[in-house]
Image (cartoon, helix red, strand yellow):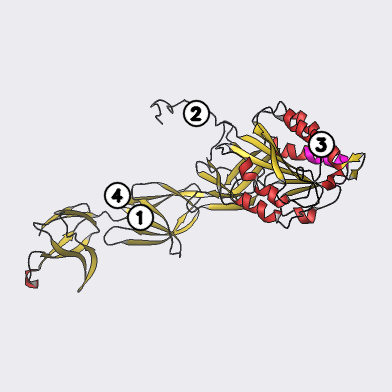
Amino acid sequence: MFLSPGLFAQGTKEPPKPKPTTRILFVFDASQSMYGRWQSDTKFDLAVKLLSNILDSLRSQTNLELALRMYGNQKQFPPQDCNDTHLEVPFGKDNISRIKHVLKTTIPKGTTPIAYALSQAPKDFPPCDNCRNVVILITDGLEECGGDPCAVSLELQKKGIMLKPFIIGIGKNFREQFECVGTYFDASNEKEFRNALKVIISRTLNPTSVQVNLLDAYGKPTETNVNMTFYDDLSGLIKYNFIHSFNAKGLPDTLDIDPLVTYNIVVHTIPPVHKDTVKLTPGKHNIVGLDAPQGYLSFKASGNNTLKYLPCIIRKKGEPETINVQQFDQLEKYLTGFYDIEILCLPRILVKAVEITQSHTTTVEMPLPGIAVIQKSTNGYGSLYLEDKSSLVWLYNLRDNQQQQETLYLQPGTYRVVFRSKYSNQSSYTTEKTFKVEPGQTNNLKL
């Protein structure tokens, strides 16, 4: 896709990302037991009436699509048919009247294959790049076909096919059996059923916002401009990436994210900080705080000489893992604390227990190196050594390919190059040169 050069010019705002479409799949129990009496009517007729009332309230809702799957409505029991489930109304716009008609004209007659009905959900949700898939299961009984609704639900959530389902249990408390399937609501009477539907729809559709406070060493939310990744705690899938920012009032920006997901948040400071199992309150403004106090690290060579392309390895104090490779001329932020630093000049310089403090720039200074330009008249084998009193300390192997000249940054000191042409078949043709490196000076050596 071609992007116009002026698309992100200064002062030009990016168009807001479109809001996701919420797709709600109602999985409705039409088994024979739903003909049982409940309050003022049969369980089935009351559930149909109450659900229809909720559906009418959703007619003007934008970015919403609905679908209806039923089970137990096709085959008479007995005999038991554990495949008795069907997507009666697929997802689409303005299909509420059709869903209500199917509900009104259905006659409960079969068994209760809950696990199998849920397992068909991947076929019910067509592919979509910007959708959130919600399942609302309405039932008056438990699995009757030997399936495992908990395992099916967990697998579909892990694959990112649907969010954690909602379950409304009619007439009897099935919380113990259904809590592993999703968020359970007990409806022992009509009022509780109506309230459960309202709460579920509210949690699903009402705007939910979150503010992430990146706290400094004083507990204030002053840190910013770092990427935050929100992972689905259950599936491990990446849900969002946001580069933290402040709004016009100088406060952490407000994010609009899905409240039905439990998140693991990683803030990509160096090293990163984590906050796991973050649960949001739907329909509310949520504030999440993470400790992320940071300071800066820079490098300097004596004499104010700026070096480039000199990598420096950064590790947490006393730990072997490399957390960053910072170029010598780069300014980088780190969490406050102590770090061991290895500057990859020749010979290497190790600086231990460098402290990074809040909002302060810590500068690590090294002696100004010199430069050795080693020119080879032919390809060959050779090495560079530091003369340390009466011994040689290996530093670097010269390249034996077609490169005839190598330029090396070297710390002040005395060095020796040992070399033999690859076309000389006697060790006696080995040559060596000793040279002294002074700060800021260049040595040209011809081999």
Q: Residue at x 29, y 49 (%)?
A: 309
- The relative height of residue 61 versus residue 141 in the rendered view (above or below) is above
Q: Secondary structure at mark 4?
A: loop
Label pair 4/3, CB-CB below 8 angstroms: no
Q: Residue at x 87, y 40 (%)?
A: 190
- Mark 4 vs mark 3, CA separation in Å: 71 Å
- Mark 2 vs mark 4, CA separation in Å: 35 Å
Ranked by sequence position, the earlier of labels 2 and 3 is 2
The verdict on residue 195 being magenta is yes
Looking at the rendered structure, the kind of residue marked 2 is Glu
Residue corresponding to mark 4: 309
Q: Secondary structure at mark 3?
A: helix
Looking at the rendered structure, the kind of residue marked 4 is Tyr
From the image, give the main secondary structure of the stretch colored magenta: helix
Give the x, y percent position of residue 409: 24, 55
For marks 2 and 4, give the one nearer the viewer: 2
- Mark 1 vs mark 4, CA separation in Å: 10 Å
Looking at the rendered structure, the kind of residue marked 3 is Val
> Which residue occupies the foreground of this view, 24 or 311?
24
Q: Secondary structure at mark 2?
A: loop
Give the x, y percent position of residue 426: 7, 71
Q: Residue at x 68, y 38 (%)?
A: 24
Q: Can residue 356 be seen at all in this image of the molecule?
A: yes
Describe residue 150's horizontal placement relative to residue 263 as left or right. right
Residue corresponding to mark 1: 312
Q: Quadrant of residue 137?
A: top right
Provide the residue span drawn in magenta: 186-197
